Image (spheres, helix red, strand yellow):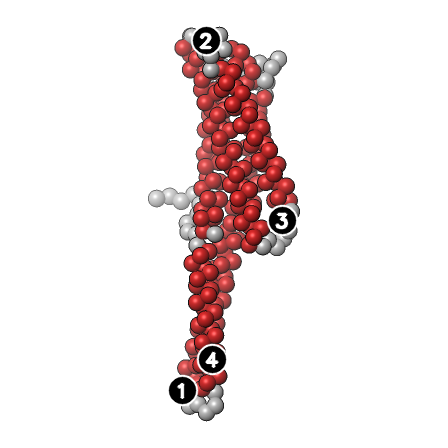
Amino acid sequence: QKVGAGAVLARVDSADAYRTLRDAQTNLETALLSLEKVKAPASGLTLTQAQNALASADDSKRTADDNLEKVYLSANGDVVSAFLEVPDMIVSLENILTGTDANRSQWNMDFYKNAMQQFTDKAEAYRNDAYQKFTKTEAAYDSAYAQYQTLGTSVSPLQTETMLAKTQTMLENFADAVKSADAFIRLYKTTMEGQQREVGVPATNAIATLGDLNTKVTAHQTAISGDSSAL
């Protein structure tokens, strides 16, 4: 099976990481106590064994610390990845709905609604649902981005967890908006084809673009959901 660039191969569960860190800390403390007990008097062999146990426990703790840090680094990376791509995705969705390539005198969604409303009573409801979900997506993005802007170069675990929740909500809203826009334009396409009317290139292109947007948002949702589950 081929794995694409940037694909997640494995994730470290922070619960396991915390458990490992706790056990490593306990083992380190035990090794320190054992070393103190054998220092005086102690045979060379006993002292060496205690020192080796201490070194092993110290290594285990460092590894546990590193694994826990990786959990949060992975989550932070996925948040940054989403905010690098989502703005352009929102612009694409906005252009599909409020652009004027279908008709220069009105928004695309109004052109689609007006063209098909004489043939179906669903036109206005589908148009309004698509636009309402788009504006809800914009609001969710603005809220998440405001939180994102407060992050410094050093992000605390609590900040990471808060940012994951905000990002997840933003992505859920965007996915709903894409789904609604797709249903609206497909209704237009099906209705016009049923009347032997021309659908037009803009609507056909819009459906293809919405498919791409759905693929992208699903990938981000999978990554953020995985991070949230791990934490």
Pick the residue in front: 5 or 230.
230
- Which of the marked residues, 2 or 1, is nearer the chain's N terminus? 1
In the image, taking residue 91 as reference, residue 175 lies left or right, namely left
Q: Which marked residue is nearer to the observer: mark 4 or mark 1?
A: 4
The residue at which mark 1 appears reads as 45
**Rounded to the nearest whole Å, what is the CA distance between mark 2 and mark 3?**
51 Å
**Rounded to the nearest whole Å, what is the CA distance between mark 2 and mark 1?**
92 Å
User: Residue 87: where, in percent of width, then height?
Assistant: 58, 35
Pick the residue in front: 37 or 107.
37
Q: Which mark is residue 33?
A: 4
In this picture, is 54 found above or below 68?
below
**Rounded to the nearest whole Å, what is the CA distance between mark 3 and mark 1?**
52 Å
Q: Secondary structure at mark 3?
A: loop
**Three-letter amino acid code at disc 3?**
Leu
Q: Secondary structure at mark 1?
A: helix
- Name the residue rendered at 45%, 68% in the picture: 24
**Three-letter amino acid code at disc 2?**
Phe
- Which of the marked residues, 3 or 4, is nearer the chain's N terminus? 4
The residue at which mark 3 appears reads as 151
- Which of the marked residues, 4 or 2, is nearer the chain's N terminus? 4
The residue at which mark 2 appears reads as 119
Q: Which marked residue is nearer to the observer: mark 2 or mark 1?
A: 2
